[in-house]
Amino acid sequence: MNVGAHVEDLLRGLAPQVLGVLARRYDRFDAAEDAVQEALLAAATTWPRDGIPDNPRGWLITVASRRLTDELRSEGARRRREDTAAAQAPPGDAETVDEDDTLDLLFLCCHPALSPASQVALTLRAVGGLTTAEIAGAFLVPEATMGQRISRAKQAIRAAGASFGPPPEVERGDRLAAVLHTLYVIFNEGYTASGGPQLQRVGLTREAIRLTRAVHALLPDDGEVAGLLALMLLTDARRPARTTADGELVPLAEQDRGLWNRAAIAEGVALVTDALARSAPGPYQVQAAIAALHDEAERAEDTDWPQILALYRVLERLTPNPMVTLNHAVALAMVHGPQAGLELLRPLDDDARVAQHHRLEAVRAHLHELAGDSEAAQASYRAAARRTTSLPEQRYLEGRAARLAG
């Protein structure tokens, strides 16, 4: 690993620790987050050149504290803020080095006052340590637009009167669910980008896995946290085989399974097996169990589709939504024939959440192809291609239609 990459990894790990110190000390999350970003930028610029300091965490806390103090002084709060800061021990000395504020920061970034899009953006910046430009690039929006989104999110947290620290016990379950959903969204956007020239954005999937690992380390007995981490590992394990050398999509059934990451599969299987043995199954655990069945099949034709179908029926009871139904339809088709799957899809045409989504037509096309209805499959593949904004998916869908026409 080169020096720059090592510094980047180090800074991302330290970012929530430093922000936690400042947010707790000054009780100003919005200003603290800006100061930490400036300190991270300064470190990213100077450390590769001058070397990593002996106490990188203390260095960041000191730099961020100075910048935050300057900011608070400019707001006319010099005496009160400096008195508060003076009552604290010098930066980096009295703070508990082993204290991990990641979960409290995630709870704050996923505050119910924020929209899901804002929760994702603020999580990546405040907890992930990504710059606004990096987040904007990942989601294919202008940096100014993402900057405004993050700024509004911090203002919303301040207006809601949210303070740094764990949420009230009565809110903890809902807030943890929001945190897990946010990490799930980040992972999915990285694994299959919603638009643009690339199928995958590896930086986002890695960041989602890193943050979910951090949550699992803090909540090792939570079955759904373990389930989400398992799901990410089992899904990401297939990444090396998902695209050709020139970036074209390769469907699951046609992937070279020898390229799959066996260490990630083993870890994911162990996580979900342990979680299911210790706790009532939740949606992430069930999805991880489905992913494990796919990953453990040596060949596509060895896939245990009856067991996968049974798990999708469980998943639909736990979290009924059209995307689950789409996958359920595929499993049903693999067990009871494509017509059964097509019948399950029919009501989705009237579901506004998915009626215009390219995945509905893509699944329908696949089932028509399995049924031998080449004409209907071509029409659905082309309809799906028109609806997606992902260029690799578009090329894949158009290619399927062309092969059937030829």
Image: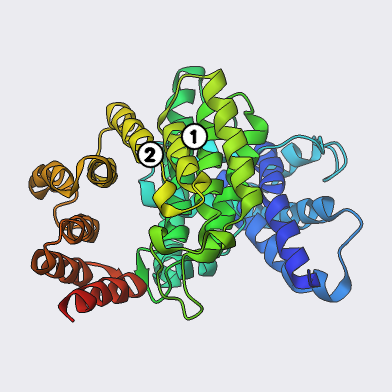
- Camera-nearest residue between 184 and 280: 280
Q: x%, y% of residue 134?
A: 53, 68
At x 85%, y 43%, the residue is 90
Inspect this view and state whether residue 105 appears: yes
- Please name whichever residue, 365 or 4, is drawn nearer the observer in this view of the structure: 365
- Which residue is depicted at the point 59% across and 46% down? 265
Which amino acid type is shown beneath numbered disc 2? Ala
Residue at numbered disc 1: 162
> Which amino acid type corresponds to the residue marked 1 in the rendered image?
Ala
Q: Measured from the top left, where is residue 122 in percent x and y?
A: 49, 51
Q: Residue at x 63, y 59 (%)?
A: 37
Q: Relative to 6, does residue 207 appear above or below in the rendering?
A: above
Image position, residue 282 (x, y; %) = 43, 27
Residue 100, placed above or below residue 199: above
Horizontal arrangement in the rendering, residue 376 relative to residue 281 (left or right): left
Q: CA distance from mark 1 to mark 2?
A: 9 Å
* Disc on res. 113: 2
* Label total for image: 2
Residue that appears at 64% across and 28% down: 220
x and y percentages locating residue 399 in the rendered image: 27, 77
Q: Are marks 1 and 2 in contact (CB under 8 Å)?
A: yes
